[in-house]
Amino acid sequence: MLRRDVLLAGAGVAAGLGLGREALAQKSAETLRIVMRDALPNIDPYYNNLRTGLVMAHQAWDTLVHRDPESFEIKPLLATAWRFPEPTVLELDIRQGVKFHDGSDLTAEDVVYTLNLVSSPESRVATPSNYAWIEKAEATGPFAVRVRLKRPTPAALEYLALVTPVYPKAYREKVGADGYVRAPVGAGPYRITKFEPGAAVEFERFDGYWQGSPKGRPAIRRLSVRFVPDATTELTELLSGRADWIWNMNPDQFEQVNRLPMVQAVRQESMRLGYMSIDAAGRSGADNPLTKLKVRQAIWHAVDRKAIAEKLVTGGSRVPVAPCYPSQFGCDAQAATTYDYDPARAKALLAEAGYPGGFETEVVSYVLPQWGSAVQNYLQAVGIKARLTQMQVAAAIQRNWQGNTPLFLGSWGSYSVNDVSAIMPVFFGGGNDDYVRDPEMQRLMLEGGSSMDPEARKHAYSAAIKRATEQAYWLPLHTYVTTYGFSRQLNFKPYADELPRFYLTNWK
């Protein structure tokens, strides 16, 4: 704590003496310097599942439809109109006059190419469940597309708005997947001029961006994004004047940052959940204690989630009782079995499970170290000796997908899709993140995602929530409250969908 206070005190002097000149220099240079921790190994939006990647995608690519960040209303973007003539058929009218960054014209063929590619199992996209509802797309005219769905998909337009950027067919086929990562081309308000995997992304305003877009024309000419290894370095970059914008800063710095003259901090609750997955399926070892129900129930009782939300996350963080964000369609809190913080009950359950002295395991984490340490300490207090392995995000996710994480601390923002189909199938649908592997849960995921009848969907998802919590499969810890830090020279507005829109940002 002493080191942190010294850092802020020194930065306060710097802010008073030099940061004003730094900010003005950046303003005159028309460059916004952004620093983030979650480094991107791959800039292609379909081949990373990091929030950082989604943020980058929305600056440089356009999707078929646009979800208004205030009202969540679906509006035209690359598609000017759409309709469902049948529950499993979606027809789209494609906007004419749109240019990709390489100067080529967007047509129906680009949309068809994109949808068919990413929905194919052979494409190996990072989050297949986002596109598993697409059967086939076909062009019915130069600017008309018909999409056949495998099943009725009520959230189809949400997925098209948030996680389905359109590729330029001719360019991507010419350079190949690897070449596309090195020099990506989209149709968004910014174009990517440089990408260094894991290190940096450079953007420049695309002057050929189509008129009338709800995204508007960017006011700031250039974005310069750099990736750093940890939160301390990130904050240092902001306070020393080498960055104009950061996010996910340590909440305990909020008040101190706001006392400085040239930088500020703001908070906004997002749809992101912090969670701990528990290896109920025995992926990390068939004799894993976590495969026993009473052990998992002990873990749910052992962790004081309310204290983590209120004292560590802060800013109005809440504890979800169900494995989904409260506003998402189908997130039925009433169906959930609840577990109070009760260390004595946790110890009794461990003894009943055959572990009166506890056991040893591992927690792999990429969340803030102090949050991981809190979970570790709560487990230790009831006899579960969990060594904490802190990793960078991409490496931790890769290890998790390999089935080698008994306990895993992560976060999931549902790609900001306000429907439980964007979270529960990820963790209960049989994919890489599923440490449950429960056929009944998989059946309920399919049932809930295969109907246009809201009541039928609610029934399936409520049954899934009931089973998931009764079996203590996947522990929702807290909602995220994103803490942003940025120059006071910058006009920036955060939104609940956790998508920073730099194309709407401007210098004062």
Image (cartoon, rainbow, N blue to C red):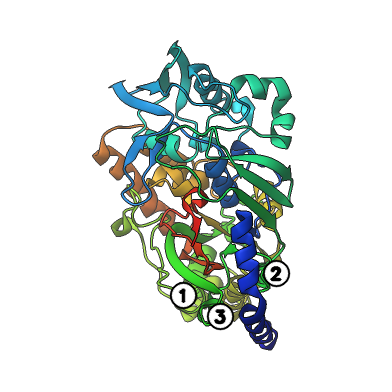
Disc with the residue nearer the chain's start (3 vs 1): 3
Work out how far the residue at label 2 is from the one at label 3, CA to CA, in angstroms: 18 Å
Of helix, strand and loop, which one carries label 1? loop
| Sequence-earlier tag: 2 or 3 | 2
Residue at 55% of width from left, 48% of height from top?
Answer: 55
> Residue 69, percent across and down?
38, 49
| Foreground: disc 3 or disc 1 | 3
Identify the mark at residue 314; answer none if there is no mark.
1
Q: Residue at x 68, y 53 (%)?
A: 39
Decide if residue 37 is on the left or right side of residue 140. right
The image shows residue 503 at horizontal and vertical percentages of: 50, 48
How many angstroms separate mark 3 from mark 1 (CA)? 21 Å
- Do the CB atoms of the residues marked 3 and 1 lie less than 8 Å apart? no
The residue where tag 3 is placed is 260
Q: Which residue is situated farthest in the front direction here?
A: 28
* Residue 446 in sight from this viewpoint: no
> In front: mark 1 or mark 2?
2
Circle 1: residue type: Thr
Position of 92 relative to 44 (above/below): above
> Which callout, 2 or 3, points to the residue nearer the camera?
3
Residue extending farthest to the bottom is 2
Q: Find residue 472 and report its horizontal and vertical position in percent.
A: 47, 60
Task: Look at mark 2 in the image and give the residue it sits on.
Answer: 233
Describe the element under mark 2 as helix, strand or loop: helix
